Image (tube, rainbow, N blue to C red):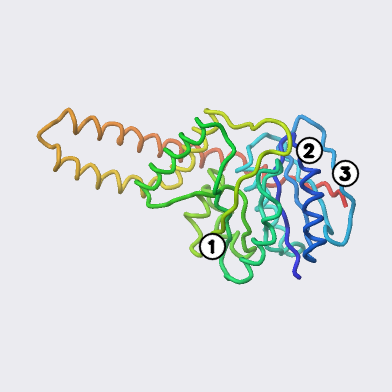
Amino acid sequence: MKNFTIVIPVYNDWNNLNRLLKKINLIGKKNSFKFDILVINDFSTIKPKIKLKKNIYIKKLGVLNIDKNLGSQRAIAVALNYLFKNKKKIKHDIIIMDADGQDDPNVIKNLIYTFKKSYSDIVVVERTNRNEPFWFKFLYLIHKIILFIFTGNHIKFGNFSLISFRKIKNIIYSSDLWAAYPAAIVNNLNNIKRIQSERKRRYSGNSKVNLIKLFDHSSRVFSVFKNKILIASIVYSYVLYFIFGEDDLIFHFFTIPIIIANLYNFYIDFTNKKDFRNNTNLLKAKLRKIF
């Protein structure tokens, strides 16, 4: 069985990470999988404490330390850049998952076997159920509906995925990845295979999700598809004009928010690209080997 590199962004979730690593080790043992683990320390305020020891199933474990808190999406971008730049030493296909336990490690087996059978660019894990508050589920549903109406894309997955190493070059040089990993995948890869799994509860602690973070994530996702959204907006505006052309009040009620949303989309894209350029030094993060 070939090796895989598992990328795990972490911000202060070291206890949960240790629980996850034990489960990954057990899955490797049961299925004869072998893993390298790359932990991205997203400028944690708690000192990293990793208890796992080297074994035949987890051969390497390293921590990539970032000197600025970026959030999981951009931490993943840093990790993928690091792996690609070190491709002479590391050329494994890559599993990406969160450290808090919400991404079920038991799904890794299905990810790997689906990846081998499908010959896809990436296998993503769509969430069949979310253990978040009602307000989050409702607003996230609105986000998905609007995204589908204006882009035709239905994104039901997050970070949990298995991507072919040869395909990461398609996304690492794009500011799309700096905006949002799932959106970058949909916008830059063609052969996407989907499997489904329930999103589990955190091993411990409270979710860091809040309204501001949800709005920020949603804005960055929309900005990746700014051109599609602009074209769809023009089409919908023409349709509205033919339907409500004689009623200026109704026509402007719909079209003015659409214009504002598109302007905001391009503004977010501009600021994201600027931030990507200004933080290229973070792509040179240094690795600390655990074993």
Instruction: Pick the residue in front: 51 or 131.
Output: 131
Q: Is residue 32 above or below residue 250?
A: below
Rendered residue at 81%/43% (across/down): 18
Left or right: where 18 falls relative to 225 = right
Determine the secondary structure under disc 3.
Answer: loop
What label sits on residue 215 in the rendered view?
none
| Residues at discs 3 and 1 in contact (Cβ within 8 Å) | no
Q: How many marks?
A: 3
* Image: 107 above or below 242: below
State the CA–CA distance, disc 3 to disc 1: 34 Å
In the picture, the disc for residue 14 is 2
Residue type, mark 2 in image: Trp
Q: Residue at x 56, y 29 (%)?
A: 210
Per the model, the C-alpha gap separating discs 2 and 3 is 10 Å
Residue hosting label 3: 51
Q: Are marks 2 and 1 in contact (CB under 8 Å)?
A: no
Residue 230 x, y percent position in the rendering: 33, 45
Residue 163 quadrant:
bottom right
Which residue carries the number 1 mark? Answer: 193
Q: How many neighbours does mark 1 have within 10 angstroms: few (below 14), some (14-19), or many (20 or more)?
A: some
Say which amino acid is labelled 1: Lys
Identify whether 211 is placed above or below 277. Answer: above
* Classed neighbour count for the residue bearing mark 3: other residues with Cα under 10 Å, few (<14), some (14–19), many (≥20): some
Tell me the amino acid under the disc marked 3.
Answer: Lys
How far is the residue under mark 2 from the one under mark 1?
31 Å
Where is the N terminus found, in terms of image quarters?
Answer: bottom right
In-front residue for pair 266/20: 20
When the figure is inspected, residue 278 is found, relative to residue 60, above or below; the finding is above
